[in-house]
Image (spheres, rainbow, N blue to C red):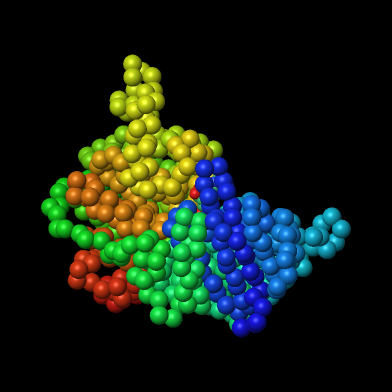
Amino acid sequence: MAEVPMLEMKGITKRFPGVLANDRVDFDLYAGEVHTLLGENGAGKSTLMKILYGLYQADEGKILLNGRPVEIASPTSAIEHNIGMIHQHFMLVDTLTVAENVALGLPSSRGVLTDLDAVSEKIVALGKQYGLEIDPAATVWQLAVGQKQRVEIIKALYRVARLLILDEPTAVLTPQEVEQLFATLHQMTADGRGLIFISHKLHEVLALSDRITVLRHGRVTGNTTTEGATRSSLASMMVGREVKLAPDKPETEVGPAALEISGLRVIGDRGNVVIDDLDLEVHTGEILGIAGVSGNGQRELAETIAGLRQAESGSIVIAGSDVTNQTPAGVRSAGLAYVPEGRMKDGSIGPFTVAENLLLIDHNSKEFLDAGLLNFEAIRKHSQSLVDEFAVKTPSLDTPVRSLSGGNIQKLILARELSGTPNVLVASQPTRGVDIGAAEYIHIRLIEQRDQSTAILMISEDLDEIFGLSDRVAVMYEGKIMGIVDPKTVGREDVGLMMAGVSQEGRSAPGA
Ligand SMILES: Nc1ncnc2c1ncn2[C@@H]1O[C@H](COP(=O)(O)OP(=O)(O)OP(=O)(O)O)[C@@H](O)[C@H]1O
Ligand SMILES: [Mg+2]
């Protein structure tokens, strides 16, 4: 390790209206290491990194690069200092190609127009060097999330980033994509780059980091090297108490089928068959977990059930009523609650307040109407109790949702969707992006809902979550159910093989 850290942040303080987001934070980074920032939702991780990247200005404190004090007034100035940032939410323009996205904002090499051919060549070269292969001519909306992530990294590397900030880069990646990403990151540190990593997944933090700094309520509350740290030691450092990493799950009575899907066929965005003659039943009082590598039709399945996507053929029945190709509102009134995968896009409205977002589905409920008018007092009470119950960290009910931290937006949508007693709950990646303490609470809530006779279809790429919660596990591969297994008797390796398209009997599936 070099003697002088490549980065020192000293005494950083940042206030937002009603929030002390960073409170005299010290943080440093040496060339060639991965230093992880760990902390609950709203702890101030993204804020600290946005200050380093010039998106926010600190109220107090200073930043030194290679021992010299610097002002980072904007992302342009951060880029000039060789700092790159991969954001918590993708910043790509969907309608442009990979090369165009990488070229965006680059100083032009040929007058007004950037030379896209030269950009494409360099993208291919960087891709080879770091195992980030991607077609520079592909349009971004056509890419899978893992590929979009690659584009973000290439974009940062293209600008010669020596210091790379990765704010939850793995939240949307499959286990295989994470492995690939980590190989790339190891190569980058071997080249002498410094990486700042943010993740709520403790096994990833342990696998990747050299050092870990814990933030709580904007303050540094702990430092450790990875050596000697364990998942539970990190969890309790973060939350300040012991955390149950696996939920308690009592046995329940399984009732009749509340969600019945038969012969479902769905065409995807690229015109191909993404769900192929699929049959599935979920019973009241059970959690059916859908395991699978993302991109195998899970998202389309959830969207089709929720009425957000057309079924080509087949039928979907909720609590006895046929809801095939009904409007989202129609499906809701049949008793569906839906936690979408893309919560920023589909689940919330950024400029609306916390209270308004909590009300999005409930505005016709009698509880909130008084002689036909909205009863604001009842609404506020209801909203406040949800915010408290789910520990959504927000300065007030009137704060616009877009100024909440990523994980707190997730908690807000979960609070809304888990607050009723639906017949069927479809939950996609229910704990993606939420901190350990919140994940523990969401798991408890899912089990409670199951025990109150909701049929739960849970889609997750997290095998710990699948095995911890599911009563039955269905494995989805290329738009089909490869098999349904009992998680008490079938192991992870078998499920992992099925996820890769190898059927239960060990035969290779068609197309595998
Ligand atoms: N632009 C903003 N305006 C107002 N408040 C903000 C803004 N950005 C962040 N905050 C607040 O600052 C606090 C820290 O947020 P930050 O996004 O840094 O958390 P985080 O640690 O990244 O959390 P997560 O794990 O959920 O991403 C939160 O209370 C958040 O609501
Ligand atoms: Mg964040």
**Nearer to the camera, 299 or 481:** 299
| Residue at the image position 35 percent from the left and 32 percent from the top | 381
Is residue 199 in sight in this rendering? no
Q: Quadrant of the C terminus?
A: bottom left
Image coordinates of residue 43 in percent, x first then y, are 48, 56
On screen, residue 153 versus residue 310, left or right, reads: right
Q: In which quadrant is the N terminus drawn?
A: bottom right
Residue at the far top: name it.
Answer: 371
Q: Is residue 165 left or right of residue 180?
A: right
| x and y, in percent, of residue 219 in the image | 50, 59
Instruction: Decide if residue 30 is on the left or right side of residue 289.
Output: right
Count how many numbered circles sit on residues in the image: 0
Q: Is residue 458 above or below residue 379?
A: below
In the rendered image, is residue 356 in sight?
yes
Task: Report the residue at 61% width, 79% height from top.
Answer: 32
Which residue: 60% across, 73% down?
Answer: 29
Of residues 272 and 31, the one drawn nearer to the viewer in this rendering: 31
In x, y percent, where is residue 479?
Answer: 38, 59
Q: Look at the picture and state if 20 lies above or below 132.
A: above
- Residue 407 position (above or below residue 323): below
The image quadrant of residue 114 is bottom right
| Relative image position of residue 274 (x, y in whole percent) | 43, 56
Between 207 and 460, the one nearer to me in the picture = 207
Q: Is residue 307 above or below residue 499?
A: above
Q: What residue lies at 27% left-to-right and 45% top-to-bottom? A: 424
Outermost residue toward the right?
A: 111
